[in-house]
Amino acid sequence: MNSKPGLRERKKQRTRAAISEAAITLFLEHGFTRVSVAQVAEAAEVSRRTLFAYFPTKEDLVVHRFADHETEAARVVRARPAGTTPLTALREHFLRGLRERDPITGLNDRPGILALHRMILDTPSLVARMERFKTGAERALAEALRETAATPELTARLAAAQIVAVQWALANDNAERLAYGEPADERYAGAVQDAEHAFALLENGLHRLAS
Amino acid sequence: MNSKPGLRERKKQRTRAAISEAAITLFLEHGFTRVSVAQVAEAAEVSRRTLFAYFPTKEDLVVHRFADHETEAARVVRARPAGTTPLTALREHFLRGLRERDPITGLNDRPGILALHRMILDTPSLVARMERFKTGAERALAEALRETAATPELTARLAAAQIVAVQWALANDNAERLAYGEPADERYAGAVQDAEHAFALLENGLHRLAS
DNA sequence: GGCGATTTCTGCACCAGGTATAGTTTTGCC
DNA sequence: GGCAAAACTATACCTGGTGCAGAAATCGCC
């Protein structure tokens, strides 16, 4: 279907990739805050003005890689087999993510990914930018729940907020441990256990919380 | 204990208040983005540099008012009567907030508060700044759960994430409705019902979510 | 291949938030 | 009254981000 994207389009994609690559290389080498967008533009052989035509902010040079995941939970819920509860579908999907070491689960220790996660975790403006994805994911998931699970508006929003918060916490926990040096393969079993515990908590509630 | 804060300290407090007041007045009148910190400084009869000595960022000129609430949930959990579960204590506290129209519940329609909430809701950088409070609240609450409810680390973090997310969603929902024109007194009954529903969901889990 | 029309890129000037520095004023205290 | 510490100010600077006008590349068509 996309056999003929046209030279213009192809060039745009190449330029975009070049900018992103130059940015991430420089950021990983010298630190996000210590590299200016001017330096990135120069490294990518593009004017500063053009860089901002491709990426609206400096932070986006990094986090655009996660943009797709914003609607992932919503897609999973929509695509679940008939008779499956949303929570089950999401749990299975998350467990598969762990098995496959999907970076979004925080359980990927390929050097590039690891360094990227580390950088994000200790750069406040990048963390803030990631939070916006969380909000987007919440909204999309709520909509999916409302549409496919006959869930009232408020319940959908509450459930979505809980689910996204929990998935985020799990991924963060994994990413932190890996950033601290634990190998992914060694962490895997624990990550699975934790995920199952977390989804059980979502499913059964917090009523067991000691008084 | 603080009978003699000293002239220096009192003056600092007055300056701080003057800056904050000037800022909020100008922001509410002309919009957050359309007022520069230079204008705020001038209105407060203070140099720009001094303004930044009191408030680290422009956003903090607005959101510093919410700083206390960051640890509120944690305090409530720590101060709960013996034999009370954390969730019960938090629910009671939230319901009391609604009754008293505590701005933090989103259920206060005093013009100043309302206008402030409206401004925050449609200023992305302010929303982002508020999210950081959410993160702080999560961390503090997790710590309180861990310490006072004999809850394992991960469970505490997961529970805190869920609880804060839910309270946030409730407050947001109320604030949005009020921003849309609904009077607080008229919204009250619904807000209580919603809160009770939300805490029940937290307590009993999402297992009822239709397949 | 050539040639207008359109899109993209660039350079430049500009604004605002935030920081570093060095010097001036104010306050606390003996 | 006078001295040290603290707070404040002016100034210059850096960086992210935007507006604008013109140069350059691409497209589609002849």
Image (spheres, coloured by chain):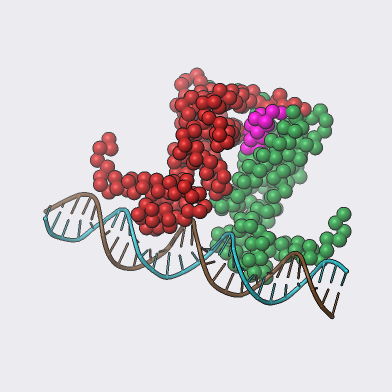
Chain colours: A red, B green, C cyan, D brown
Q: Is residue C24 above or below residue B133?
A: below
Please give left or right for residue D23 compared with residue A82 in the image: left
Residue A23: x %, y % from top left: 43, 49
The residue sitting at 83% across, 63% down in the picture is B6
Q: Is residue C22 above or below residue A19?
A: below
Q: Is residue B28 magenta?
A: no
Q: Quadrant of residue A49?
A: bottom left
| Viewer-nearest residue: A157 or A114 | A114
The residue sitting at 48% across, 50% down in the picture is A30
Q: Is residue A148 above or below residue B110?
A: above
Please give left or right for residue B16 compared with residue C7 in the image: right
Q: Quadrant of residue B193?
A: top right
Quick check: can you spot residue A86? no
Of the 4 image quadrants, the one containing the N terminus of chain B is bottom right
Q: Quadrant of residue B204?
A: top right
Q: Residues in magenta? A: B151-165
The residue sitting at 54% across, 26% down in the picture is A186
Mostly what secondary structure, the magenta segment?
helix
Residue B90: x %, y % from top left: 73, 35
| Viewer-nearest residue: A166 or B180 | A166
Quick check: can you spot residue A183? yes
Q: How many marks?
A: 0
Q: Is residue B155 magenta?
A: yes
